[in-house]
Image (cartoon, coloured by chain):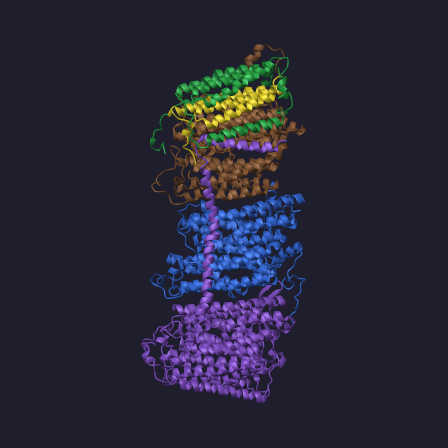
Chain colours: A brown, B purple, C blue, D green, E yellow
Amino acid sequence: MTAVLAQATGVDAPIRFPAVEYWTLVPAITLVVGALVLLLIASLSRRTYGAGLYAGLTVVTGLVSLGTAANIWQRVSDEGPSTAVAKAIAVDGFSTFFAVLIACAVVLGALLAESYVRREQLPAPELFVLMLLSASGGMLMAAANDLIVLFLGLEILSIALYVLAGYHGRREASSEAAMKYFLLGAFSSAIFLYGIALVYGATGTTNLGEIATFLATNVLSNNGILLGGMGLMLVGLGFKVAAVPFHAWTPDVYQGAPTPVTGFMAAAAKAAGFAGLLRVFFSAFGSEQLDWRPVVFVLAVLTLVVGSVLAIVQTDIKRMLAYSSISHAGYVLVGLQAANDSGVAGSLFYLLAYTFMVIGSFAVVTLVGGRGDSRHSLDDYRGLASRRPGIALAFTVFLMAQAGVPFTSGFLAKFYVISAAVDRRSYALAIVAMLGAAVAAFFYLRVIVVMYGPPAEGDEQRGIPLPRSAAVALGIALAFTLVVGVLPAPVIDFARHATLLF
Amino acid sequence: MIDAAWLIPAFPLTGFVLLVLFGRRLGDPAAGWLATAMTGLSFLVTAGVFVDLLSMEHAARHATVDVFSWIPVGGLSVEVAFLIDPLSITMALFVTGVGALIHLYSVGYMHGDGRYPTFFVYLNLFVFSMLMLVLADNFLLSFLGWEGVGACSYLLISFWFTRETAASAGKKAFVTNRIGDFGFMIAMFLIFSAFGTLTYSGVLPHAEELTKGTATAIALLLFLGAAGKSAQLPLYVWLPDAMEGPTPVSALIHAATMVTAGVYLMVRVAPILELAPTAMTIIACVGAATALFAATIACAQNDIKRVLAYSTISQLGYMFLAVGSGAYVAAIFHMVTHAFFKALMFLGAGSVIHGLHDEQDMKRMGNLRKYMPITWVTFMIGWLAIAGVPPFAGFWSKDEILLGAWNKSPILWFVGLFTALLTAYYMTRQVRLVFYGDDRWQQAEHPAPAVADPELSHAEPVAPNGHGPSEHADPHESPPTMWIPLVVLAVLSVVGGVINLPFSHDTEHLLRWLEPVLGEEAIHLFDGNKIVLALIAIAASLIGLAIGWFAWRTADRPELEPEPLRRAWYIDPLYQAIIARPGQALADLSSWVDRNVVDGAVNGIAVAFREGGGQLRRLQTGYVRNYALGVAAGTVALLAWFYMRAG
Amino acid sequence: MHAPTPDVTFPLLTVIILLPAIGGVMVLLTPSRRLDALRLIALLFSVGTAALTIYLAVKFKSHDGDFQFVSHHWWIRDFGISWKLGVDGISLWLVVLTGILFPIALFGPVVKKDVKAYLGWMLLLEAGCLGTFLALDLFLFFVFFEIVLVPMYFLIGGWGYENRVYAALKFFVYTLAGSALMLVGMLALVFLHQAATDRLTFDLVALAQNPGVGESTARWIFLAFMLAFAVKVPLFPVHTWLPDAHTEAPTAGSVILAGVLLKMGTYGILRFGLYLFPKAAVDLAPLLLTLAVIGIIYGALVATVQKDLKRLVAYSSVAHLGFIVLGTFAFTTQGLSGGVLQMVNHGISTGALFLLVGMIYERRHTRQIAELRGLQKPAPVLAAVFTVVMLSSIGLPGLNGFVGEFLILIGTFVTHRWWAVVAASGVILSAIYLLWAYQRVFHGEPDEANASIPDMTWRERATMAPLILLIVFLGVYPKPVLDRINPSVERLIDHVEERTGESQPAFAGGGAGTTEPHEVGE
Amino acid sequence: MTLLLAATKVDMTVFVVASVIVLSGAIGVVIARNPVHSALMLVMTLFGIAVLFVAQDAQFLAAVQVIVYAGAIVVLFLFVIMLLGVDREENLGLEELRAQRPVAFLLGVIALAEIILLGRGADWVSGASSVAGRSQNETANVETLARSIFTRYLLAFEATSILLVIAVVGAVVLARRLSPSTPSREDQQ
Amino acid sequence: MTVDAGAYLTVAAALFTIGAVGLLIRRNVLVMFMCVELMLNAVNLTFVTYARELNDIGGQSLVFFVLVVAAAEVVVGLGIIVSIFRRRVEATADDLHELSG
C-alpha cells in the first residue's frame, strides 16, 4: 500500500534499497517458507493429510533451519560478528545461538504435537504453521539490532502463541488461556512499546548500536526519560519471560494451553524474551548497569522465591511446571544481573539446557494427560513407574535436571549462572538462588515420590500409549540432558562463544 | 623365661579364642578343663618368671617385653609391651593362681548350665584382661585390661540374663565402672600432656617434675578410676548387686582379682601419689570411710553373698586406707591375703549355695557343718583369717594396715580398728547362721517378711542351673573339683601371712621383694608401740567374735538388724533420686527439645513455605484484571526506582 | 603450573569410581525378571570394586603424606574444572571402607522388592561415594557430594519403612539446602583466587596453596563450607534429618548412610575446611568444638530415651560423629588421626549395628524396644555378635571404637582441655544407652513372640563376619592403618601451622624433627 | 509553559481542542457503559490523535490513522459487538474485585505522575537529532517516510508480512468450529 | 516553534494511563481491548511528537509499524473473543477465572 503511494508521488531520486544479506536471515526465512509450504499443501491439496506429514515437514524445516544456523555460526566465527540489512539485525554468535535453540524447540515441539493433534483430533496444519511462524519471530527477536525489529519479532512470536494457546477449541481452559494471554500480552506490549518510544525520545534512535554509541558518547544531564523507557521495556520483556511480578499469566496460560504448545512456549518464548532482554540491557544499556542491575536483582529474587514457593503448593503438574518455569526465569535473571560475559553465557547455557528439560517434561505431561489433555493432577501420576517405567524414568531425569542434580544439564546451568553472580560479588543473590534450588527440589521430588508410589485405585488399567514421534522427542531431550550433564564442555564452549555483537 | 612373659596372657587368650571357636563342640566339661588348663599354664609361666626374677640382682628385677606397636600416632606411641617387675609379677601370680583354682572350681560349679562353654569363654577372657592390666608397661594397655575386666564383669554378672536383676546388675557394674574409667582416662590425658608418654617407665621415674597441682589432679583422677573398679565410696554400689553373677565369678572377679585392680593401680603410681599429700589424705579417708560404711551394712544382710560383698568393699577400703597412708606394701599384702581368704569364703558360699540348690538366704540355712564338713572347715579358716585372729593370714596384713593408719592419723587408725571389730562380728554372724543352729532350709516355703522385698535380698528362688530350690533335698557336700580349691585356699589363708611377717626386716619378704618398685618403706615404728597396737587389734577382733558368737545363737534377732543397715543406708534409692531420675528427666527433656524445638524449627520452615505458598496463591485469583493490576503495580514500582535514580 | 599430566600408569582411581557406575548401568539394562543375572552382576561389580580398593590400600605407599595415584584430566576447561582424583592417608581408608561396606550392605539384607532398581541404585550410590572421597577438584567433589543424594533418596523412598516418603524428602531437601551455601562459597573462593593469581581453577591443591582471600572473607567461606558439612555429619543442631532418614531407610540404606555418607561431612571438613581455610578453622575451632561436644552429650541423652531401636542407633551416630568433629578441630596429630580412624571405625560398628537391627526387624517385624525381650535366649549368636559390636561402639579397648575415641580425646585434651573432659563423659553415656537397650532387647525372659525367633542364618553370619574381624583387628592392631593416616595428617597439620603460626604441643606431633620432652630411659 | 506562550494562537487552539477531544474520548471509552458507545468514543480519540499528527507535520500518518483505525479497526470492533450481541450495558457501579478500582486509579495517577516527573526532569527530549533522516525538509512527508521505511526499516517492513500471515491464519483457526471429539468420555475433566 | 513537545507528551502520557486504568477497571473484554488501542495511540502520539522534536523521520516510521501490529493484534484478539463468546454471550473478563491458584 505504501509502495503504491510512494510511486504515486513520482519522486525523481530512486530509493536506494539497502543490501539484504539473505544468508543472515536464512534460519528464520526457512521457518517462514516452511510455514507457507504447509499452508499451501493444506489449502491446495484435495486430500487431507494426517498430522504426520505436517509434523514431518515441520521437523524437516526445523532441522534445515538448524543446519543453516550452524552454517552461520561457522561464518560468524570466521568473519566475526556484523550487522545486516541496514543494521536492523545483528549477525553474531548470540543470535545464532538462539536460532539453534529455537530450531531445536521447533523440532521437539513438532514431534510432540504430532501425536497430540492426532489424539485430540485437532486440525493439523495450522498448528505447525503457527509454530513455525512464531519461532521465526523468536529468531527475529534474538537477532534484532533495532528496537522496532525486536518489537515486531516479539509480536510475531506472541500473536502466534495467543492463537496456539487457544488451539484446543474443545477445552474451555484453552480458550481462557488464550484470552488471558492475549489481553495481558497486549497490555504489556503496549507498555513495552511506550518504553521504546521514550528510549527513542531519549536517544533519538531505536537502533541498539546507535543507542549504545549515543550513551557512550553523550553525558545526559538528566536521563529520566531514558530510565523511564528502560523501565517500561523491562516490564514488557519481563512479562514475556515471566519474571515476578509480571508472571501472573504464566500458570494460567501454561495450564490452559495445549500441552505441546506449553512446552514450546516455555522453551522458545522464554528464550526469545531473554534474548531480547540480554541484548537490550547488556548491549544497548550496558552503560546504565548501575541503574538496572539492582532492579534485576530484585526481580530475580522475587522470581526465584515466588516461583518456588508457589510451585510447592500446586497439585496440577502443568501448573507446577509453570511455576517452576518462573523460578527458572529467576536463574536466568541471575545471569543477567551479573551483567558480564560469563553471566550472558551462563544465561544462554541455562536457556538451552532448559529448552530440552522443559520440552521433555511437557512431553511426559502430554503423554500422561491422555485424551482430552486433562489428566494433569498429581494423582494421575500415581504409580506411573509401575505402569510405564520408561516414561517415569525420563520424567525423573527431567525433574532432577530441573532441580539441579549433578550429571544433568540443569546442574551445570545453575552452576554457570550462579558462578557468574559470584564472580560479580552478588553473593546474596547466589545464596538465594541456591536455596531456591533446595526448595525447588522439594516439589520436583514430590512428583517423583508419587510416580514411584503405588498406583491409584482403578487407574492401573489406563494405558499410556507412547507414540513414536513423542518417543523420539523424549529420547532427544533425555540424551541432551544427560550427555550435557556429563560432558558439558562443547555446549559451554558454544554458549561462551555466542557473544553479543558489542 | 622373662622373655617368654608374653606367654602369661597368651595362654588365657588362646583359651578364649579356642573356646569361642570350638567351645560349643567341646561342651561340658571339656570346655571347662581347657580353660582351667590354660589358666594353669599361665600360672606356671608366671611362676617361672617369678623364679627368674628371684634369681636376679635386687635392683635389676625389671624388664620390659615388647610385643608389637599398638597405637603409634605422632608423639604418642603406645606399645603392647609387658613390664615385668616384682609388683606386676606378684599380681600376676595371684591372679593366675587364684584364677586357676577358681576355674577348677567352676568346672564343677557350672556343671549342667546350658551355657557352660560361654562361661569359660568369659572367664578366660577375664583372666587375659586382668593379666594385661597388671603386666602392661603403660597406662593405656593397663586401661585396656582395666576396661576389659569391666566388660567381662558385665558379661559374667549378667550371665543368667533371663533374670532382670542379673541383667540390671551387669549394666550397673559396667556403667559405674565407666564413671571411674572416665577419671582414669582424664588422668591419662593429663599424664600425656605432662610427660608426652604413657609408659610407666617414662612417667614414674620423672614424677617429681610434676607440679603439685597436676600431681594431685592425676592422683585423684586415678583414684576415681580405682574407686570405680574397687568399689569405694561413692562408686561401690555395683558390687553388692554384682552378686547376681555365678558364685565363682564373685570369688574371682568381685573378691580376689578385679576389684583389687584399683589398689594395684594406686600402688603402681605411688611416685605420683607421694607428690600429692592432699590426694593421699583423701584416699585414706575415703578408704577408711568405705571400710566402716560397708562393714556396718554387712552386719545386717541376709544374703550369704551380699554379706561377703559388703565385706569385700570394706576390706578394699582397708587397702585404700593403707595406700592413702603410704603403706603400699601393706596394701599389696592385704590384697594378697584377702584374695586368699575372700576367694575361699566366696567359694565356700558357692559350695553352700550349690549344696542347698541355689538357696542364698542365710536365714534359711543353718547347721550345715553336719552336711558339708569340708566346706565348713575351710570356711571357718577363712572366717578366722578375715576376723584378724592370729596367726591366720588376715591378721598380719590387717595389722600392717592399722600400723600404717596409725602413722597417718590415730583417727584413721581408730576407724580401722572399729571396722575390724565389726568385721569379726558380722563374719561370726554369718558363720553362726550358716553352719550352726537349726536346719532352717526346710521352712523355706514361707520366707520371712524381712526378705520379702526383692530390693533387700536377691535371694529369690531362681534356677540358674536348671534345678530350682523348690525341690529341697538335703544339702550335700560338693564334688572334688569344688572342694579341692577350697582346701588349697584354706591352706593359703592359714599360712599366707608368712610372706611378710613383721618380726624383722628379713621376714618381711614382700617388703623386700617390692623394694625395687616401691622403694624403702617409710614406716618404722618402734617395736613396743607396734606390739601394743597389734594387741589392741587382736582384742578388737576377739570382742567382735565374741559378740557375734553369742548374739547369733538364734537366727531371729531383728533388733540387731536395724532397718537403715538392712537397706544399706538407703544409698540405692538416694542415687536413684539424685542421679538416675534427674538424668532420665534430662534425657526426656532433650528428646522433647529435639522433637519440638530443633526438628520443630526445621518442620516449621517447611510449614512456613507451604503457608507462604498458600497465601501467595491467593494472589493468583484467576481474574485477568488482577493480573494486569500486578503488572501495573510492578511498572509503577520500577518507574519509582528509576525516578529515584534519574538525575 | 598444573599442566594435566598424561596418565601413563593404570588409572586405578578412575576405574574404582567407574566400575560400580558401569555395574549400575549394566544392572539397569538387564531385564528385571532375570534376578540371578542381576544379582550376579551386582555381586561381581561390588566385590570387584572392593578388591580394587583393597589393592589400592596394598599399593599405597605408607609414610608418604602426599596424594598418590593422582589422575588429572580436564573436564570443563573453560571453568578450570578437571577430573582430578587422588588418594592420601585421609581418604584411603574411607575408600576401602566404602569398598568393603557396599558388598556387605548389598548382600547382607535380603531385598525382594524391585531387585533391579535396588541393585542399580546401590551401585550408583557406591560410585558417588567413592567419587566424593577421591575427588581433588572442588567442583568434582561437589558434584559427587550432591549426586549421592539421588540414589539414597530413592533407596529410602522406595525400600524404606512406613514413614519413608517424609524421611526421604527431608533427607534430600535438608542436605541440599545445607550444601547450597557451599557452592556459593566454593565459587567465591575460586574467583577470589582467580583475582589474586589470574588463574581460574577448582584444583584443591592449587587453591590451598594460595587461596587469595582475606581473613574475614575466608571465615565466611569457611562457614559456608562448614554448613554443608555440618548438615552432612550431622552436627548439632542441624542433625534432625538423620534420625528420620536412618530409621526409615532400608537396612542397607542405613548401613551406607551411617557408614559412608556421614563420613562425607567429616571428610569434607578435613579435606576442604581445614586444608583450604586453616586460619578460619583455627579461629572458629572453639565454636565447632562446642557444637561437637554438645552433639556428643545431647545425642547420647536423646538416644537414651528412644523407643525405637533404630532411632537409638541413629542418635548414637550423632554422638559418635561429634567425637570425630572434636578430634578434627583439636589440631593435633592424635586428634586428627583419631578422627580419621574413627570415621572408619564408626562406619564399621554402626554399619554392623544397623545390620543387626535389620536382622531383628526381619525376625520380629518391629523395632520398638518395648516389644522385644530376651532375644539372647533364642538367638545367642545374634546376641553375641550384637554384644561385640555394641562394645565396639561403646569404645571398649581392644575393639576398634576405642582407638579412635581415645586418640581423639587425648589429642583434644592437649590443646582444648575442657572440651575433651566434657566429651569424655560421653563415654559414660554411650555405655548407658547401649547397655540399657541391650538389656531390654536381649536380656530377660522372652515372651512367646520373642522366644521363637531363629538365630542367625549362615548368610547373616557371613555378612557379619568380616565386620567383626575388622572390629577386632582394628582394635588390636591399628598400626597399619595409622601408619598410612599419620603422614597425611601431619602434612595437613603442618599446612595449618604454617598458615596460622600456631602449633600443637611438641610432644603431640611426632614429625621427624620433634623429639619427645622425656626420652624414656630404660 | 513559557514556550507555550510563544506558540501561535492557532497552534495552541488546535492543540488544546484536539487534546481535549483525545482525552475526553479516552475517558469516554473507559466510562461508557455500552461498548458501542465506547467504540464511538474511541473513534473520537482517534480523530483527535490524527489532528495532533497533522499539527506535528505527520500528514500521512494522520491519514493512515483515520483510514486504518477509524475505518478498519473500530469497524471491526463494532462488527464483533454486533456479531456477538454483547452491546448490553455494563453496570459500572458494580465491581466484584475488591480494591481493584481504587488501586487501579491510584496506580494510574502515580504512573502518570512518574512519567511526567521523569519527562520534565529530563526536558522530555534528550536524543540525537535526525538519526533516521530529517522529517522536516522540502520533500513531502510521504516520500520521506517511504524512504525511511524502505531503507532503514526495510527488514521491519518485511517482517510485518509474517505478522499479517499470522493474523490471517489465526483468524482462520479461531473462526473454525471444532466438531466434538469422537470418544467424548474424556473430553471434559 | 509551535506548541511545546512536553505538552504533547504529557497528553500522550495521560492518554496512556487512561488506557491502562481503563483496562484495569473494565470487565467487558472488548472495551478492555479498546483501552489497549488507546495505549497504542498514546505511544503513536509520543513517537510522532519525538519525530517532530528530533526532526527525525524514524519516529513516524515506527508509528507505521505500530499500526500494522495493532491491526494484526485486533484481528487475532477479536478472533479469540469471538471464539469464546460464541458460546457464552454474556461473559466478561471476570467470568474467565477457572484457571487460578
Can residue A475 be seen from the camera position used here? no
Q: For the image shown, how many numbered marks are present on the structure?
A: 0
Establish if C287 lies above or below D19. below
Q: Where is residue B223 in the image (x, y as percent from the top left)?
A: 55, 72
Q: Relative to the observer, which residue lies in front, B14 or D87? A: D87
Establish if B426 lies above or below C223. below
Q: Relative to the observer, which residue lies in front, E64 or B539? A: B539
- Report the quarter where the C terminus of chain B lies: top right
Q: Relative to the observer, which residue lies in front, B377 or B64? A: B377
Q: In this view, does A376 lie to the left or right of E54?
A: left
Can residue B177 be seen from the camera position used here? yes
Establish if D44 lies above or below A274. above
Q: Where is residue C168 in the image (x, y as percent from the top left)?
A: 45, 49
Q: Where is residue C428 in the image (x, y as percent from the top left)?
A: 50, 64
Establish if C212 lies above or below B581. above
Q: Where is residue B578 in the image (x, y as percent from the top left)?
A: 47, 66
Snapshot quadrant of residue A212? top right
- Report the quarter where the N terminus of chain B lies: bottom right
Q: Residue at the far bottom: name it.
A: B528
Q: Is residue A78 left or right of residue B458?
A: right
